[in-house]
Image (cartoon, rainbow, N blue to C red):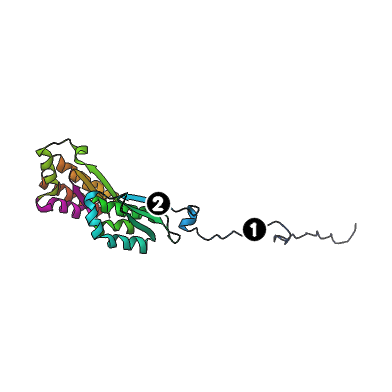
Amino acid sequence: MSTEAPATMEIETVSSEPKPGSSSLPPKPKFEPLKAHEMSDGRVQFRKVSVPPHRYTPLKKYWMDIYTPIYEQMKIDIRMNLKARKVELKTRSDTPDISNLQKCTDFVHAFMLGFDVPDAIALLRLDELFVESFEIKDVKTLRGEHLSRAIGRLSGKGGKTKFAIENATKTRIVIADTKIHILGSFANIKIARDSLCSLILGSPAGKVYSKLRQVTARLAERF
């Protein structure tokens, strides 16, 4: 019987670090964000807004109030085409965001519908604002004096009813003959539209006020 000690097993250690010659993934490329004019392959984008005859004088009066935020803040070129009677807007090479063109178009369009400049300019500042339009005949077919009385119910004495709905729902309403335009957020437009529809259908103003109070109280609780 041999008295020699058992031979120790030799273990080869393999380093887990990759060898400099092995194929490792290349570093991620870093690209500069595209500018607005580069997104559209350098093409200039246009929008045109028609000017109705009754808004021609207010447009001349408030032109600088409309021109300044569009040109200086949104970096969009704007001009009035007197021959075609349209306001023309186009992007510039330094326009920071391509969506600015559509925002400016919505702003000018809202002014043409009859909204004041301080109200319409909110479309440039906030993303979740919309303009919704409908006609009285979309709700109920009315003719003659019935139509006149419906328009009177919507406005109220000295515009009292219209202002009450505007303040309760945080919207702005323009009643232009049989057309109604509402500017506000999606949820608020719905509440204002429901109130206006009730008035068109013949509900007395008092009933509409009490319903508005309930709805606005519910909205206040939610937020």
Query: In front: 170, or 85?
Result: 85
Q: Is residue 164 magenta?
A: yes
Quadrant into which the C terminus falls: bottom left
Magenta segment, which residues? 157-177
Say left or right for 144 vs 128. left
Which of the numbered marks, if any, corresponds to residue 26? 1
Amino acid on which disc 1 is placed: Pro
| Snapshot quadrant of residue 178 | top left
Q: Is residue 201 above or below residue 23?
A: above
Secondary structure that dominates the magenta span? helix
Amino acid on which disc 2 is placed: Phe
Query: In front: 29, or 24?
Result: 29
Quadrant into which the N terminus falls: bottom right
Query: Nearer the observer, disc 2 or disc 1?
Result: 2
Say left or right for 92 vs 144. right
Secondary structure, mark 2, is: strand
List the single residue furthest toward the front: 83
CA gap between label 2 and label 1 equals 42 Å
Across and down, in percent, residue 202 comes to: 12, 40
Q: Is residue 169 above or below residue 145?
A: below
Residue drawn where x is 27% and y is 46% of the image = 132
Across and down, in percent, residue 143 comes to: 13, 36
Asked if residue 170 can be seen in this view, the reply is no
Q: Residues within 10 Å of mark 2 (few under 14, many from 20)?
A: some
Q: Which residue is mark 2?
A: 46
Badge 2 vs badge 1, beta-carbon distance below 8 Å: no
Across and down, in percent, residue 96 comes to: 43, 60
Residue drawn where x is 9% and y is 39% of the image = 145
Asked if residue 110 can be seen in this view, the reply is yes
Secondary structure, mark 1, is: loop
